[in-house]
Amino acid sequence: MDLNFTPEEEAFRQEVRDFFAENLPDDIRDAVKNGGELTKEIMERYHAILNKKGWLGTTWPKEFGGPGWGPVERHIFDEESCAAYAPRIVPFGLSMLGPVLQKFGSKEQQDYYLPRILNGDDWWCQGYSEPGAGSDLASLKTRAVRDGDEWVINGQKTWTTLGQHADWIFCLVRTDPDVKQQEGISFILVDMKTPGVEVRPIKLIEGGHEVNEVFFTDVRVPYKNLVGEENKGWTIAKYLLTHERTGIAGVGFSMLELEEVKALAKKITRNGKPLSEDPLFAARVAQAEIDLEAMKLTNLRMLFTAQKQGAPGPETSILKIKGTVINQELKDLRRRALGPSAAPFPGSLSGSNLDVAPEGHANNAARYFNNRKTSIFGGSNEIQRNILTKTMLGL
């Protein structure tokens, strides 16, 4: 199933392809291809390369410093960046806070924060989830009390991705405990260097340090750091999450993963035949490819809808569910294809004759285990099904 693009769109695709061939450094490409660590230094360099071209804020209109792309251009850029083994753009400032400030922020906030996001002056992290408020986000307990021209914040956030690198955090906080949960929440920006902010690492199952706990103890924040209206943060939260869930789908990365799995299946043999000829394995690959092609069309359809409406709608939950399920299936197929070579530390197994993972498939176990999180974060897939049931089916 191929999408038909206009000559102008195909010319844009070639421009993107040539750009990555000429400008993406080899060490960054190799880190992505081999599952290496994408350090802050790597991501800052990559963001600067895109920003110099004017392609960093991929969803931003020109008036705010973005390229002003339509849905097809964004789709093509995602495909080609993944095919070039470019990193995924760090989303917190660019894909989450940026659109929020453009819609809900004051002119002063837009003029100050948006250029700093593009220039890399500020790195952001997301202060949403709490120990008792993950998928049930509206039950959050972090409290912000107004004291003159300041907010005083106390509470805890968890699963704060890349919080150890962040300069700022955008937080959902409870500013009115006496009303319905969703009606007493506000959206506030906090400088991570403010006294009383403490970041503690959380070590993940594959051994990495990607997420953190963030504690707030009598943290004083200027009142002007409130985005939008007081106690109206739930509306902003939902708006931001639709952008996050669209990004989590990772259509381009799944396309790349599919091609790698198919190539592996042709090289690796089982019982004297290529794995691609194994009927059970081949059937799983075929089903994943069918699901991915359907998701590509769904993604484009939703991008067009978002362009007309000004924001993605609740149907982004479909992308979040299917995107994470498909990508997890592809990583499981890669793991099964590699067999013993997929072991986390094959060289450390004494007396073993395990093969080293083929080029481009190092750290497979780490990638597999790390990817288990995607069906949970951004609102678990179970919660996404509830959202679809209520908002789209009216049940």
Image: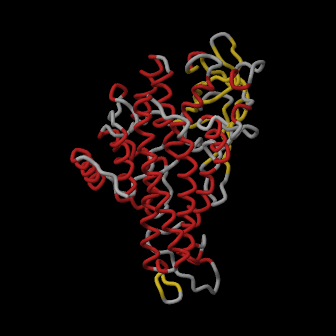
At which x and y percent is residue 34? 46, 64
| Camera-nearest residue between 177 and 169 | 177
At which x and y percent is residue 255? 43, 58
Point out the residue furthest to the bottom here. 272
The quadrant in which the N terminus is found is bottom left
Q: Is residue 265 above or below residue 224?
A: below
Q: Is residue 169 above or below residue 112?
A: below
Q: Is residue 210 above or below residue 142?
A: below
* The quadrant where residue 114 appears: top left
Write the residue at 66% across / 32% down.
197
Specify how the rendered protein is coloured. secondary structure
Write the residue at 51% across / 80% down.
278
- Judge from the rendering whether residue 140 lies leftward or rightward of residue 162; answer left or right: right
At which x and y percent is residue 364? 54, 67
Write the residue at 61% across / 34% down.
391
The quadrant in which the C terminus is found is top right
Q: Is residue 55 above or below residue 23?
A: above
Point out the residue furthest to the top here. 148
- Judge from the rendering whether residue 76 lies leftward or rightward of residue 161; answer left or right: left
* The quadrant where residue 142 appears: top right
How many numbered circles does the render carry? 0
- Judge from the rendering whether residue 116 lies leftward or rightward of residue 2; answer left or right: right
At which x and y percent is residue 20? 31, 52
